Amino acid sequence: MTGPATATSESLEVELVRAARAVTELPRDATVLLTCHVGPDGDALGSMLAFGLALRRLGFADVRASFPEPFDVPDAFSFLPGLDLLVAPAEAPPRPALAVSFDAASPTRLAGLTDALGRAPTWIVLDHHASNVGFGSVRILDPDAAATAVLAVGLIDRLGVDVDRDIATCLYVGLATDTGSFKFDATTPEVLRLASRLVEAGARPAEVARRVFDTRPFAAIRLLGDVLDRAELDPAAAGGRGLVSAYATRAELEHHGQSAQVLESFMDVIRTAAEADVACLLKPVAEGEWSVSLRSRGGTDVSAVAVALGGGGHRLAAGFTGAGDVADVLASVRAELDRS
């Protein structure tokens, strides 16, 4: 494994051509394994399923998609086409003829699936994280891409597959989630042109918005109230730019009958605090273990904080796995913010 490559239009095109050639040269009965990162978001899952559907359109008969445990599709994405491609990680082919990973900046984000990926003669990596550590044999990496979905549609186009309604829906979900419903700085004219193309192909923005962003169980709303009730503002953190933080506990999840997946959308509320440039949300994984999400309004590079703490991401959105109690994890975040 070597370091990450700096994306240029020329190098990206070369890798896209290499990836397309690797796919087209495979016999149609070859086994293909598609993977995305643990706890998949809309971009990871949508990009992976879109590409799987494209492979089916090409005539591939044995395409399987998976992600690390906990193997549970979030309710918000339960309407996505192509979910029948999914298999539990224990059922993933151990020696695929081709492996493709989506939206993972390091092999650790693919957990137990990395052995199978590494055994494939070709491992194509599609990712848009600037913190990507450099892995796989064909690397379609572009930190300037708004979403991995942008890279996935580029490869689908080079394979000559028409983007139909099902593929468009998966790609639109990826694009919409990673641009915050087209509110983030990553929303460029190119992104909006791609969104328009996907809508013309059959994606339904209103349905995606309703299912992905605007629907949650009432119990999740009660849980959000508990989380917000203990949110804390530290105006002095991040060199005076401010930090807002909050967390949920495993006991609260059990009390409200909710999975940890519902916590993903809570950041959209927490990060609106006007007095803080940085928002931090701790989500319980196990006793003394936390999945930590970081967001910045623009004054702080939270990817630098996440990388220093063993994670990765983008300048405005990043994350890592923290150990210890809440105070320990927040102290480590504050210390890195002060260094940034």
Image (spheres, rainbow, N blue to C red):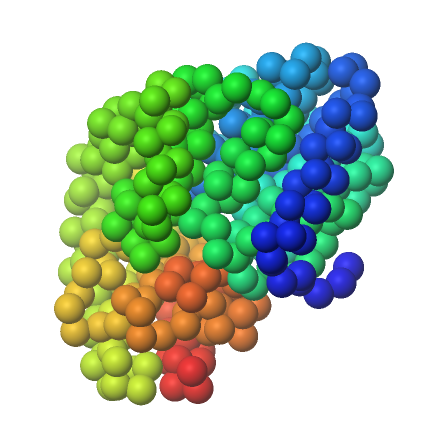
Residue nearest the observer in this picture, 312 or 2: 2
Q: Is residue 225 left or right of residue 168?
A: left
Residue at position x 25%, y 78% in the image: 242
Please name whichever residue, 61 or 225, is drawn nearer the observer in this view of the structure: 61
Residue sitting at the far front: 10
Question: x and y percent of residue 101 in the render?
Answer: 63, 41
Q: Position of residue 314 (x, y in %)?
A: 45, 61
Q: Which quadrant of the figure contains the C terminus?
A: bottom left
Locate residue 257 relative to residue 122 in the image: left or right. Answer: left
Residue 133 sits above or below residue 37 on the image: below
Counting the numbered discs, the total is: 0
Q: Residue at x 59, y 52 (%)?
A: 9
Residue at 30 percent across and 54 percent down: it is: 184
Is 42 situated above or below 301? above
Is residue 227 among the parts visible in the rendering?
yes
Residue at 32% in and 57% down: 185
Residue 110 in sight from this viewpoint = no
Name which quarter of the figure residue 56 lies in. Answer: top right
Q: Nearer the viewer, residue 78 or 49?
A: 49
Point out residue 210 in the picture as x, y percentages from the top left corner.
23, 30
Q: Quadrant of the N terminus?
A: bottom right
- Quarter of the rendering containing residue 151: top right
The percent coordinates of residue 308 (x first, y second) are: 54, 75
Q: Is residue 291 above or below residue 153?
A: below
